[in-house]
Amino acid sequence: MSLPRLDISQPASIAAVREAALVAGRRIGVHLAALALIALLVPVRGAWAAQVLLIPLLIVGPGVILLRALRVPGAAIAAFPVYVPCASLVVLLGSGLVVDLTGLLFGVAAPLSSGPVLVGLEIVCAGLLASSWTCPPQVGIPWRALPHPLTLAWPLIFPVVAAAGALRLNSGLGGGVALVCVVACVLLLVVTFVLAPRLDGNRLPVILYAAGLAMMWSFSLRGSLVYGFDIASEYHAMQQTVLTGVWHPAHPGDAYGALLSVTVLPALLHSLSGVSGLLVFKVVYPVIGAMFPVAVYLLAARVLSRPWAFAAAAFIVTQATFFQQLPALARQEIALLLFAAMIAVMLDTRLPRRSQWILAGLLGLGITVSHYSTAYLAIAMLGLALVLQVAVSRFREVPRVSWPVLIAFGAALASALVWYGPVTQSASNVSQFAAALKASGPDLLPNHAGNLLASYFQGESAKQLQPAQYATLIHGYYAVHAPYVTPLADAGSPAYALRQPPGSAPPVRWPLGYNALSLLELLVQQLANLLAAVGALLIVVQRKTPVIARQVGLLGLAAVLILTAIRLSGTLAQSYNPQRAFLQTMTVLGIGLCWSLRLLAGRPRWRQIGVLVLAAASMAVLLVTAGGLSGAVLGSGAGTNLANSGGDYQQFSMTAPELASASWLGRAARPGQLVYADRYGELRLYAMNGYGPGTLSDITPLTLDQHAWVYASSTNVVDGFTNSFLAGQSATYAFPFGFLRANYDTVYTDGTSEVFHR
């Protein structure tokens, strides 16, 4: 007689379910604790310690919760941790928009104040947590398997030193600390690239982040206000949102005010963390933007070996467009990181299909509401890649249609049509481009008389006009396009003719070395661009290329076609700066560049060493020249990150007296009155008063209206320089003090800036 079998499977399965439920409960409990900590810290956000805790909590916490709700595997997040801050940005943008629109619907005066945005964020995150209760165990991030943060933190001393150097310069002290920091960043990137095969792979992204943030802070922290051109207008849009606590959707003709990245997001961060809107732009946004090279490294590491993946990202860190221009484009800092994450999501085979599609779509939406140009380029790039993929699938192993790419393309396109159209009514840039295209056509290489190769790869550089040439051209332009301007009777007197500006550029101490380094920089940059394009093509056509690499190549090939059009067409270049477009496309073209370098290195040891040395030397050359070291050491003037002098410093570094005079003019001038400020002065007006297209930037006797207001910045008053821009041509001349003081009253002066009126 056989004994009855005991059925132990059911109790075991029940125990497993209970254990899974306990694990899920513990993990959700951790997230709830983080939300509770945010809620407890917000009331005391005035204390710096609370601010230091709240900023990382806001950048990390909501993103982890969203990724959990989307069932993104923890292993995928550990392999690409940039998903977390990008997901947090999506949650913050979305919750802030919902709170704002809901508040407007119910008549709340300031829905973006701390109370409403905190409640909105907590409700959104709690809802996401509730939807994630049944998540499988693999969704949890393997925190214990990750390296301890303190063991990787030593490179972060570089951003601290960079901040100290910038603040010392702001205080009128020397640039020694700043100079040491740039030299250290050059050495850090070069040495890390050479030693990359021997280093722990977890250290490489931290080093990239530290070097990138150090270079960004060295510019963003300069001056009393924000540093840069576009960010002056962005600052005004942000400040208005912060002060009023509300954002209105309708922004006809106001592209900046229509973007959540410069309105709702900084207002939300300010309301929750207590960090001022100014510091959000100067400190926090670079902290986010510096993750872009890290994202490129993690993406490149999927198809390249560790040293070449590092090189693909380090090449971005060496670009002046990254560390000097990007911190001056708050909207693009956010959108560019979301774009890199969207590319990574589209190519991430570890993600479940549903999670991949939803996340790609959300990131596409985030790009649209953050920056119009990044969205336009992303739409064009993804659309071309889809067409190329259909063609290439006929003769190479690649799916005919990539659904994640198609969904991201559709989400970005549909959201752009809706957001820039009926929601914000801010698509004036599109209509302006259409009008320019109709009037001038593609305007192929308008400056083709120069170096054709440089014109193609570097875009259309501004031609320098002599003062007399500029005076004639601008007078003719005003006669046709500004007939409402009535000059004074003596404006054409020879005594008031424009003259050369005072002083001269600092002499070059070693002309041979300086010219050789400049030529070497040009050759390196152009060779890198060429190798990136060739690499993208080779990835696509080579037979044994992995599918993921081939998809990167298709995106790169689409980027090459777009860059070709932008850099050949003056009309397109005026619509989207070629250097900024290049930086965005380096998300994939950096991989193409290092694919070519890897092939050139080959198998022989001597070739590998030779290519590695050349690549390391190229990084050093690019960062030495773009970072201002060549000018500081060899002459011609140091960059703004190293000295309180130079053209960029004169234009972009704003002082408190200048801002006070600009604010006074904003109160004194009446609507409809003409206000003049050159390219040095107009940024002060934009930042304080929001003057946009209505400000005239041509301060010459024949273009000044007889009843005009004229704003003179410190560069105009103290240095005597004036700078204007006309149809891609730049002119620098002596400020016309003689004409102004003979015909206008000095109605405001503080010794360093003045306002004239009559």
Image (cartoon, rainbow, N blue to C red):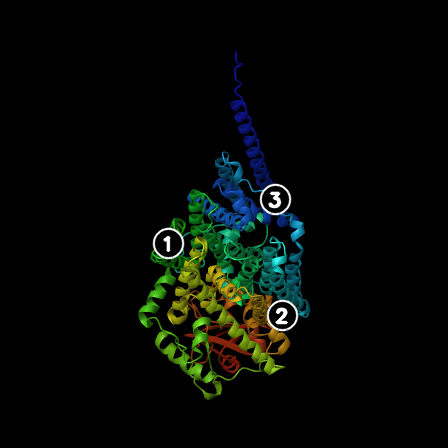
Residue that numbered label 2 is attached to: 642
Name the mark nearer the viewer: 3 or 1. 3
Name the mark nearer the viewer: 2 or 3. 3
The residue drawn where x is 44% and y is 49% is: 360
Q: Residue furthest front?
A: 1
Image-quadrant location for residue 612:
bottom right
Pinpoint residue 742: horizontal percent, then vertical percent.
Answer: 50, 82
Upstream in the sequence, badge 2 or badge 1?
A: 1
Upstream in the sequence, badge 3 or badge 1?
A: 3
Pinpoint residue 163: horizontal percent, then vertical percent.
Answer: 64, 61
Disc 2, SS: loop
Q: Are marks 2 and 1 in contact (CB under 8 Å)?
A: no
The dot on residue 413 is 1
Q: CA distance from mark 2 to mark 3?
A: 41 Å
The residue drawn where x is 43% and y is 85% is: 492
Upstream in the sequence, badge 2 or badge 3?
A: 3
The residue drawn where x is 55% and y is 32% is: 20
Q: Residues within 10 Å of mark 2 (few under 14, many from 20)?
A: many
Name the mark nearer the viewer: 2 or 1. 1
Pinpoint residue 702: horizontal percent, then vertical percent.
Answer: 43, 80
Amino acid found under the numbered disc labelled 2: Leu
Amino acid found under the numbered disc labelled 3: Ala
Q: CA distance from mark 2 to mark 1?
A: 42 Å
Position above or below: 3 against 126:
above
Whether residue 479 can be seen here: yes
Amino acid found under the numbered disc labelled 1: Leu
Position above or below: 239 against 361:
below
Q: Residues within 10 Å of mark 1 (few under 14, many from 20)?
A: many
Q: CA distance from mark 3 to mark 1?
A: 39 Å
Residue that numbered label 3 is attached to: 145
The dot on residue 244 is none
